[in-house]
Amino acid sequence: MITATGITKNYQRGAESFAALKGVSLNINEGDFICLLGPSGAGKTTLLNILGCMDAPADGDLVIAGQKVVTSGRRQLTDAKLDRFRRKHIGFIFTDFFLIPSLTALENVEMPLLWSGKPNRERAKELLASVNMDHRLNHRPTELSGGEMQRVAIARALVNNPRILLADEPTGNLDTKTRDTILDLFDHLNQQGLTIVLATHDHEIAERVTQVVRLNEGRLEG
Amino acid sequence: MGVWFGLAIKNLLRRPTRSILTILGVTIAIAVLYSLLQFQVNYEKGLKKELGALGAHVMVVPKGCPYEAATIVLHGGKWPRYMDEAVLEKVKSVPGIAQTAGIIMDAILDFEKNENRIFMGIDEDYPKIRGNWHVQGSWFTGAKDEIILGENVAKLEGLKVGDTYYLKEKDCSFKVIGILAATHSQDDGFYFLHRKTLQKVFDLPEKLVVILVKLADIEQADKVVAKIRTMDGNLNVFPLSELLSTVGNLVQSTNIFVLAIVFIAIAISAVGVLNTILMAVYERTKEIGMMKAVGASRSDIFKLIWLETLVVCTTGGLFGVGLALAFAKVIESFVRSALPYASRSEALIGLSLSDSLACVLFSVVLGLIAGWYPACHAASVKPMEAIRTE
Ligand SMILES: Nc1ncnc2c1ncn2[C@@H]1O[C@H](COP(=O)(O)OP(=O)(O)OP(=O)(O)O)[C@@H](O)[C@H]1O
Ligand SMILES: [Mg+2]
């Protein structure tokens, strides 16, 4: 599903260049549920953004669903094509949910459909129902709890029917009980065939997930 | 598309005061633009109508400023230049002339009340040139104390046929022998005396201010004008077509000046729009990055921000036309007080579909231009950097 080879990424910090990823190679198969485990600053977010086509690596190859995205550090798709590709294949979830405060739960979920040019309220409702949020359709984010907001965000990430879900510390702001319901939801989605990559520094999560990839100081371990 | 609009409007409503003030800026600029467009058209229309109603083709006046002469002829007034009545006979003798009318005029100005009473000294020839003259009561019989009042004057003074009009400034009494039925021209606002009477009362013996000339054949205008120009007596001879273009040019040159100011106002409002939208984009950088992260493309973001600008400008444009129409009377009275040539027979600011459309279209274009940069900026937001910023 995703093949990354020799991915590097440098950040400019003032005059010096800082290597956040130092040659990461990773193969993710369809239907995998992978936990990307590593301490803070290891480069998890950086790697996830590259896998999600939101950021470009300095060097390396990236192939997603058979599409060459990056070859030897060079983008293979134009901006517009990359936008469309990303929308079609990849769903994103963040620690801070990133819902639009002025829109209701339903409108937030429907928004990505707007971008793909086919707004569909029913689909948005279905998805909210599948994450057990159908009782909060018309609530705004400020009127929802953290766990509820994350469930709305998951519904939104899935609305375009992506095959890959990238989750960056999705339970970082949640208590352990809420965290477990979210993880159960992930398990459920994974069983339906969704490929999931979850980045976290939480070892308890890593224990629940079968495939764990350890990242430290920009390198994969073990 | 409806959903897009909904989203754009929701975004604008997040900062209602700021959005409303920005819209107001556009509203005012477009209101001024609409008023000016209307003014330009209607002013000329009114002028043409009035010159047409004058009934004459050529105007002979003593030498002086041609614009002043035009005002005098169209609106009446005091003019310190006169020609001898003898000129009238000479003009009459020029071949190709169908009708002439010699006119003497004077005005009593009351600056305190801002009232002008304009007295026109005429004879039988004047109605012949004017055409649609119907006097209720009777025409001058030859007595020295007769007056005919324009329709509006009669109403203003509260006088009927048979009443006496006392002219305090000259200590003279006149008998109202006739009232001119409404002509919907400047005549409605004049006091008419027989030429001889006026010359006597205002102490202007054998003087004239203007001679109106109607031609037998309008094609011969150049010839007749040339002939009158050879006569001595220090005359200015205007074919009315020339007068129209002279006044037209004068108004046009002021219009260009006013238009320049309008465009500055519009430019300022456009900068206001740009500023507001750009601020909104900066504020929402994180949100824009997030929208991109969940599937919005560059062009989606561009469209959304552009649409927001369009909503602001188009709303401003629609309100602007509405504002211009709502305040048409106020603007009009202001323009009239500043511009002496304005005709009263034609509304200066009226409802015009094409001008409304032009203004709204203009505001749309304004939005397209003002929104370009903020939309480009928003489209180029890098999602990961945007999300990282606190
Ligand atoms: N835009 C940036 N400019 C400079 N340095 C950056 C930038 N983004 C990340 N870094 C650095 O790169 C390294 C990896 O960052 P990254 O965010 O990928 O870590 P992480 O594993 O996600 O950490 P956390 O668990 O705290 O989220 C860190 O040292 C970070 O300071
Ligand atoms: Mg991180």
Image (spheres, coloured by chain):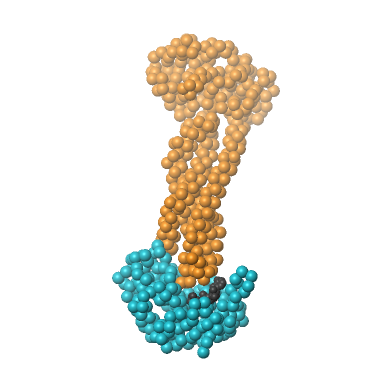
Chain colours: A cyan, B orange
Task: Tell me which residue sits at (64%, 70%) in the image.
Answer: A15
Q: Is residue A49 visible?
A: no
Task: Tell me which residue sits at (67%, 24%) in the image.
Answer: B229
Frontmost residue, B231 versus A146: A146
Q: Position of residue B91 (x, y in %)?
A: 63, 20
Frontmost residue, B147 versus B33: B33
Q: Is residue B87 visible?
A: yes
Residue projecting furthest to the bottom: A222
| A119 is higher (above) or lower (below) than B238 | below
| A134 is higher (above) or lower (below) than B221 | below
Q: Residue B86 is drawn in which quadrant?
A: top right
Q: As drawn, is B352 to the left or to the right of A135?
A: right
Q: Position of residue A37 (x, y in %)?
A: 47, 82
Q: Position of residue A55 (x, y in %)?
A: 54, 74
| B106 is higher (above) or lower (below) than A99 | above
Q: Residue B96 is drawn in which quadrant?
A: top right
Q: As drawn, is A185 to the left or to the right of B23?
A: left
Frontmost residue, B45 versus A10: A10
Residue projecting furthest to the left: A135
| Count of marks, rendered view | 0
Task: Tell me which residue sits at (46%, 14%) in the image.
Answer: B167
Q: Position of residue B130 (x, y in %)?
A: 51, 25
Task: Tell me which residue sits at (67%, 18%) in the image.
Answer: B233
| A92 is higher (above) or lower (below) than B361 | below
